[in-house]
Amino acid sequence: MDALKTKQLSEDVFDYVVAFRRDLHMHPEPSLQEFETTKKVSAELDQMGISYRLMNPTGLIAEIQGEKPGTGCVAIRGDMDCLTIQEKTDVPFKSTVDGLMHACGHDSHTAMLLGAAKILQSLKSDFAGTVRFLFQPAEEVAQGAKLFVQQGALEGVDYCFGQHVMAQYPAGQIFGAAGPTHAECDKFTIKIKGHTCHGAMPEQGIDATVCAAAMIMNLQTLVSREFNPMDPLVVTVGQVHSGSRFNIVSGEAWMDGTVRCFNRDIAHAIPGVMERVVKETAATFRCTAELVYEQFTDVLFNDEDAMVIGKTAAEKVAPDHVMHKLSPINGSEDFAEYTAHAKSGFFMLGCGGDYPQHSDYFYVDEESFKTGVALYVQVALDTLDLLQK
C-alpha cells in the first residue's frame, strides 16, 4: 500500500490511540494481572468486528483475514504490563494506582497495536493473508512470550514483528539492526550457610558474610577470566543480605543478581561455571552454598530477511528518519522467545523525554505514536505482499 495512505490513516487514528493509551496509563496492571486491560482491548476489538481468543491467564490474540486470495501470516506484537513504581509525573492522566506505573511504555505499545488493528480492519479488502495481533502480558517478568508460544501464538506464522518505545531517543525515529540487539538475561540466587558465634570470637563460627564478600568478587572473574573479553558479559549482584546483629558472626547469607550476554554459547556455559565458582569459594571459607540459576530471556537475534522488510517499511513511513542502526542493548526483551519460531524483527521507536525507561518520571512524546502505528501497518502489509510472490 502507498506509504502516504498509511501515514494518513495513522494520523486519522491518532486521537483514538492517545485516548486509549492514557486510559491504560491511569489504570496500570502488573504482570499476569492484566485482566482489566485485556477486557478493554477485547471490548475495542468487538466494536471493530475483529475476532480474537483470550489467553491464559491474561492477554489475547486477534486476527484479521485479508479478503484477497492468498496465504501467509504475519504477527505483530504489543505488550501490556506495568512496573511496580510510584509515578511522580504531574500529567493529568498519571497513574491512579499506588505503587504501579507504566514506566516502560507498554501502554503505548498496546494502544499503537490497537490503532494498527483499526486501520488494517478497514483495509482487509486490499490484502491477502492473515495479520495476527499479539496483545501480550508479562514482558517485565519474561513470562508472557513463553506463555503465548506454549498456547500456539506463533503456529502458522511466517514473520513476527515488534517494537518498543525508547526514552531519550528522538521522537518518531526508528532504530533496528539484524543480529543480536538485546542481551540474554538470567537470574541467579545464592544461599550461603555457615555457623553463628559471638563477634568477639569469630574463630568459633563460620562467617557467611566474609564468604559472601569473597563470592561477590570471585563472580566478577566470570567476566575477566572465564570467557573471551571480546564477548560482552555483565554479572551484577543486585542485593545481598547477611547477619542479624552487629556483634554476631553471621551464619547465613544470600544474594541474587543477573547475568547478561549476547553469545548463546556463553549463555549455555555460565550456569556450570558459576556453580563451580560458588561451590569452591564456599568451601574455601568452610561454608556451604546453593545456587539457583534461572534463564529469563534468550538473546534477541533479529532475522536478516525480516529486518530488510522492516527497514523498507520504516523508510516508507518515516522518510525523514531513515532507520538508524541500533547498537546492542544490555537490556533484555522477551520478544526473543518468538525468534525461535518465526523469522522475526524488532525495532526501537524514539519517544523523546528527559528520563529513562523505568524512571518514576518516565514520559512519552505521544507524537511518536503516528510513526509507531504506521510502522506496524506498513510492515504487516509489506510482509503479506512479499509472501504472495
Image: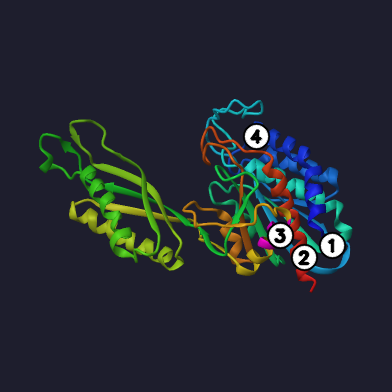
Q: Amino acid at mark 3?
A: Ala
Task: Tell which tag, 4 or 1, sits nearer the viewer.
Answer: 1
The reply to whether residue 27 is in sight is no
Nearer to me, 352 or 379: 352
Tell me: residue 374, above or below residue 241: below
Q: Amino acid at mark 4?
A: His
- Assess whether mark 1 and mark 2 are in contact (beta carbons under 8 angstroms): yes
Residue pushed farthest front? 320
Q: Main secondary structure of the magenta part?
A: helix
Q: Quadrant of residue 179?
A: bottom right
What residue did someone put label 4 on?
25
Label at residue 313: 3
Q: Position of residue 336 (x, y in %)?
A: 56, 59
Q: Which range is magenta?
A: 311-316
Q: Quadrant of the N terminus?
A: bottom right
Q: State left or right for residue 25 relative to residue 329.
A: right
Label at residue 127: 1
Q: Quadrant of residue 369?
A: top right
Nearer to me, 291 or 240: 240
For label 2, the crowd category at 10 Å Cα-Cα, with few meaning under 14, some 14 to 19 and many 20 or more, is: many
The span from disc 4 to disc 1 (Cα, nearest Å) is: 33 Å
